[in-house]
């Protein structure tokens, strides 16, 4: 998020996360920015003030992304776990974000989460966010954006909630499309951004055994397809799986002619997307698919680095949303001059 917002003209003056590993990664890439490590529900207003040197002036934007599991599609299959604001982490992080708006009243705010936040089953959570923000005087706009529509080589739908104290905001208009029109560019493909990384070294770097016990089947999955290739409904002569009997990402393989499917936060040996050469993607490759710079420095093991990248907002998408916020703020300044 910060990388994209910086590209849109913002500068981070304070950041926070509960994960110490994220602190280390952030400090490697933004060494001059103060960082608070800890659960947002345990911070006070004074903690933020102290971290910024004892004084806080006018703030243009507070941006954040509460953890997505409470609002994710996977929670529909986990009846043993609470969803949305019934999840303690979901409530603490959403409430913590809204408290920062109350404490500091930035001119604008941006909250990002999975598409599931917009589902009817989670409407109470979205209504709580909108209602509390409107109670503070914000005009709120929300919607779901697909990263591929903004030049990210990845199909990744996320819900964005924007607010402003001075006039309504609008979500950015797509710059790319699956079916390009006169004023829209075609989606950026995985093959276009990974071609120079598809070396012999990469091909031999198996990491975890791709596909696990189903490695032989993974090799037979056509690029852009998944385990459904081996179902009776798809006409396979020797079906191996029931229709919709597995997670959709099971044995999911990239196509070089399409954007990537959504990069998950967990590096798995049977849940894709996998490279079209039937191997697990490398960190360098998922950074490209998320539009991170090649030189972005990540702390931790391969699995920990993967989790950080998979949980992130693609910088190019954040830049598109940040551009709307920046233009709005500049327009209000010019109108007041």
Image: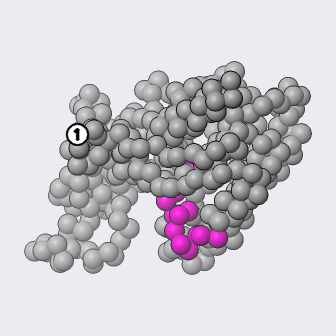
Identify the coloring.
one colour
The residue lying toward the viewer, choosing from 264 and 299, is 264
| Quadrant location, the C terminus | top right
Q: Secondary structure at mark 1?
A: loop
Q: Residue at x 30, y 33 (%)?
A: 193
Side of 178 where 92 appears, left or right:
right
Residue 248 vertical position relative to residue 162 in the rendered view, above or below: below
The residue lying toward the viewer, choosing from 120 and 251, is 120
**Does the magenta-highlighted stretch encompass residue 120?**
yes
**Does the magenta-highlighted stretch encompass residue 84?**
no
Q: Is residue 139 visible?
A: yes
Image quadrant in which you'd find residue 117? bottom right
| Quadrant location, the N terminus | top right
Residue 243, image x and y in percent?
A: 27, 77
Side of 292 where 3 appears, left or right:
right
The residue lying toward the viewer, choosing from 332 and 308, is 332
Q: Is residue 3 visible?
A: no
Residue 44 vertical position relative to residue 74 in the rendered view, above or below: above
Side of 226 where 295 appears, left or right:
right
**What is the magenta segment's predominant secondary structure?**
helix
Q: Residue at x 27, y 53 (%)?
A: 253
- The residue segment tinted magenta is 112-124
Would you name the residue on which mark 1 appears? 182
């Amino acid at each position: 998020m910060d990388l994209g917002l910086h590209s849109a003209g913002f500068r981070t003056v304070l950041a926070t996360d509960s994960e110490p590993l994220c602190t280390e990664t952030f400090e490697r890439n933004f060494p001059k920015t103060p960082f608070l490590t800890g659960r947002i529900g345990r911070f006070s207003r004074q903690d933020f003030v102290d971290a910024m040197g004892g004084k806080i002036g006018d703030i243009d934007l507070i941006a954040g992304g509460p953890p997505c599991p409470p609002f994710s599609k996977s929670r529909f299959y986990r009846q043993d776990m609470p969803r949305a604001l019934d999840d303690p982490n979901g409530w603490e992080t959403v409430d913590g974000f809204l408290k920062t708006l109350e404490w500091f009243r930035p001119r604008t705010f941006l909250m990002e989460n999975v598409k599931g936040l917009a589902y009817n089953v989670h409407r109470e959570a979205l209504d709580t966010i909108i209602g509390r923000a409107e109670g503070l005087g914000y005009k709120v706009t929300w919607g779901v954006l697909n990263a591929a529509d903004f030049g990210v080589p990845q199909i990744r739908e996320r819900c964005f909630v924007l607010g402003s104290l001075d006039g309504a905001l609008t979500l950015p208009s797509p710059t790319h499309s699956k079916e390009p029109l006169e004023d829209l560019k075609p989606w950026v493909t995985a093959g276009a951004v990974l071609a120079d990384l598809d070396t012999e070294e990469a091909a031999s770097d198996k990491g975890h055994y791709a596909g696990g016990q189903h490695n032989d089947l993974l090799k037979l999955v056509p690029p852009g397809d998944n385990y459904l290739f081996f179902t009776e409904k798809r006409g396979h002569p020797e079906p191996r799986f029931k229709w919709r009997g597995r997670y959709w990402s099971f044995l999911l393989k990239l196509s070089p002619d399409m954007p990537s499917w959504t990069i998950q936060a967990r590096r798995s040996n049977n849940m894709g997307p996998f490279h079209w050469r039937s191997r697990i993607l490398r960190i360098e490759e998922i950074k490209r698919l998320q539009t991170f710079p090649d030189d972005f420095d990540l702390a931790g093991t391969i699995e920990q680095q993967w989790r950080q990248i998979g949980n992130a907002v693609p910088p190019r998408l954040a830049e598109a949303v940040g551009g709307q916020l920046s233009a709005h703020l500049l327009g209000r300044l010019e109108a007041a001059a």
